[in-house]
Amino acid sequence: MVRVMQRIVILTSAFAATVLLLVAAAGGFFFYLNTPPGKEFRPTDGVSVTDEGEARVEVHEGESAGSVGQRLEDALLIRSAFLWNILSRLDEDHIRQGVYVVTGPLSLTAMRALLKTGRQEMVRITIPEGVTISKTARILENGGICAADDFLAAASDPKFLAEYHIPAESAEGYLFPDTYLFPRGYPARLAVQTMADNLFKHLEEIVGVRGPAVWENAAELHQKITLASIVEREYRVNDEAQVMAGVFYNRLERGMRLQSCATVEYIITEIEGKPHPTRIFFRDLEIQNPYNTYRVSGLPPGPISAPGQVALAAVYHPAATDYLYFRLADADAGRHTFSHTLEDHNNAVVLYTKAGAGQ
């Protein structure tokens, strides 16, 4: 009996020792796989490396933890996608979509903690009202958000345009001017989507309907935004925006040309690529272009700027007026004179343009 007990003790001790060795080995293995690879970061899908050696990691919308882990391993940001996947299954807290900045080597668990916080490097960017899409792209590029060319490509992507029911070749006019907080190195497509979503959120408030009902009639919405973009570039004080919208509606109803200097300015700066003019000359009014509302009846093919809240509200709620003309009367105060007849309107000898947004 004693010998049997001794054997049991020996076997138990051996088993315990084996377990301890396995635990120690597993702990050491975990410790090793948890440590940073100790190499310079490597650019790969969704991971860019700056000249300063920082890595910017994008977690895509709806991306699996396994996919993220593999990309992190490929970029030499973690040592083991295998351990990443095990921890992902054990951890109830999920990593979050976004762009994260990694300034130096992190352990695998520290990397997971970073991607679970949702805290990203943010830059405050202001897109002025009345800015064009090309100027918006330059503002974002200058702020280190995304490349201008990438932004313009994302804003012209047919898939995006179809998703947002935009009947045009780009999202000109559909990206709401506002102050945004974007991470540096943010994907251009996400910046475009954020600004478009912001526009439709404001439209919901203005129109008083929610969701898809806002764009139920895409052609009509396009006309509204196009007219709002013109109002945006014409008004200078808020209380005149609705009156200007009323004037333009009156002219459209009578089959009159809109004769907006802002559309001519758009041709000069955005289509012809010339510097922003301080004034419009009569020779400019003769430019042959579908955006020239001095020569073409009705609305131009699309928006000429990004209309803000005031201009959008003005076209949805125009002033009830019988005015047909307006002209700038006080450049310093930004006040216009509104008139019913061409004779009164022709008292103006100089045509002004609103200062270029985003210059």
Image (tube, rainbow, N blue to C red):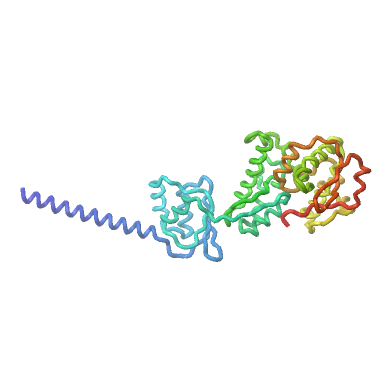
Residue 203 drawn at (x, y percent): 67, 39
Please, is residue 359 above or below residue 222 in the view?
A: below
Is 51 on the left-hand or right-hand side of 294? left
- Residue lying farthest front? 333
Q: Residue at x 7, y 51 (%)?
A: 3
Is 324 on the left-hand or right-hand side of 309? right
Give 323 or 181, whichever is nearer the viewer.
Answer: 323
Q: Residue at x 67, y 52 (%)?
A: 127
Residue 35 drawn at (x, y percent): 39, 60
> Does the image show residue 223?
no
Residue 65 drawn at (x, y percent): 46, 48
Give 192 or 181, whichever is nearer the viewer.
Answer: 181
Q: State which quadrant residue 257 falls in.
A: top right
> Does the image show residue 186?
yes
Question: How many tags in the picture?
Answer: 0
Q: Residue at x 67, y 36 (%)?
A: 214
Q: State which quadrant residue 143 falls in.
A: bottom right
Q: Residue at x 41, y 45 (%)?
A: 92
- Residue lying farthest right? 343
Residue 139 drawn at (x, y percent): 67, 56
Is 58 on the left-hand or right-hand side of 221? left
Please, is residue 178 above or below residue 247 in the view?
A: below
Q: Quadrant of the C terminus?
A: bottom right
Is 118 on the left-hand or right-hand side of 252? left
